[in-house]
């Protein structure tokens, strides 16, 4: 039994030592969204306050774990009145549900730089599965810091009504495209 425990402990230590953490460079990153308005035009917005991280032991990132979060009250569509309405109880209810989070459950390399990231999105107190299509670029060495860095752009579609964000109707589309673009530096 001691031998089994020792092997297990060494395996975990070995995994921890080769697992790499990548931190977000917020100055070169964003979390944005697009929704259809009146079934004829698209309105874009973003979240000003967000964070993300990635860990991976494999060089091809096939075992990566991605997480991102955004503070709902930081929503910005370029219109203060609309932003206030979106933060209110009719939509995001930011006072009650302050954060949107995503945690991956699997990552699959599709081809080249294209990956599928499957995980759980929690929004408005509801958690549902979300599949993101991602492009990973890099890693490359930063010429100034000499640290390794990489870029990730991931997109997916969320049915906002399924999360309890507003109601279905002719003024806003039910589906929202989410786009997370991040520049990450290896810790």
Image (cartoon, rainbow, N blue to C red):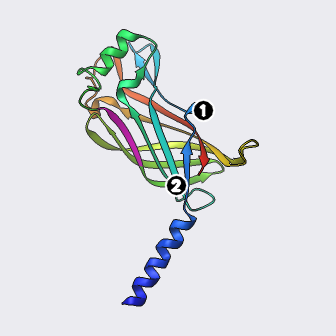
140 over 84 or under it: above or below:
below
Q: Nearer the viewer, residue 174 or 71?
A: 71
Q: CA distance from mark 2 to mark 1?
A: 19 Å
Q: Is residue 135 magenta?
A: no
Q: Position of residue 154 (x, y in %)?
A: 53, 39
Indicate left or right for 131 with 172 as reference. right
Residue visible at 25% across and 37% down in the picture: 125
Is residue 93 visible in the rendered image? The answer is yes
Q: Which residue is mark 1?
A: 28
Q: Which residue is mark 2?
A: 55
Q: Position of residue 42 (x, y in %)?
A: 47, 17
Contact between labelled residues 1 and 2, with CB atoms less than 8 Å apart: no
Quarter of the N terminus within the rendering: bottom left
Magenta residues span 98-103
Q: Earlier in the sequence, mark 2 or mark 1?
A: 1
Give the image quarter of residue 183: top right
Residue at the limit of the structure toward the right, as seen here: 143
How would you classify the magenta stretch by its main secondary structure? strand
Neighbours of disc 1 within 10 Å: few (<14), some (14-19), many (20+): few
Q: Nearer the viewer, residue 157 or 88?
A: 88
Residue visible at 52% across and 50% down in the picture: 54
Q: Secondary structure at mark 1?
A: helix
Residue visible at 42% across and 19% down in the picture: 36
């Amino acid at each position: 039994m001691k031998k089994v425990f020792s092997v297990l402990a060494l395996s975990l230590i070995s995994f921890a030592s080769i697992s790499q953490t990548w931190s977000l460079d917020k100055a070169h990153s964003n979390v944005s969204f697009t929704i259809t308005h009146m079934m004829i035009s698209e309105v874009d917005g973003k979240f000003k306050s967000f964070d993300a991280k990635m860990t991976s032991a494999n060089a091809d990132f096939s075992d990566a774990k991605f997480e991102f979060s955004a503070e709902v009250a930081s929503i910005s569509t370029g219109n203060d009145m609309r932003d206030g309405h979106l933060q209110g109880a009719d939509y995001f209810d930011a006072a009650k549900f302050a954060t949107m989070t995503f945690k991956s459950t699997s990552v699959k390399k599709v081809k080249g730089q294209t990956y599928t990231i499957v995980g759980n999105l929690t929004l408005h107190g509801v958690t549902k599965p979300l599949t993101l299509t991602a492009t990973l670029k890099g890693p490359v060495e930063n010429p100034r810091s000499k640290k390794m860095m990489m870029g990730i752009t991931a997109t997916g579609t969320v049915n906002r009504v399924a999360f309890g964000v507003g109601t279905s109707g002719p003024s806003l589309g039910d589906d929202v495209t989410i786009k997370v673009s991040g520049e990450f530096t290896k810790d």
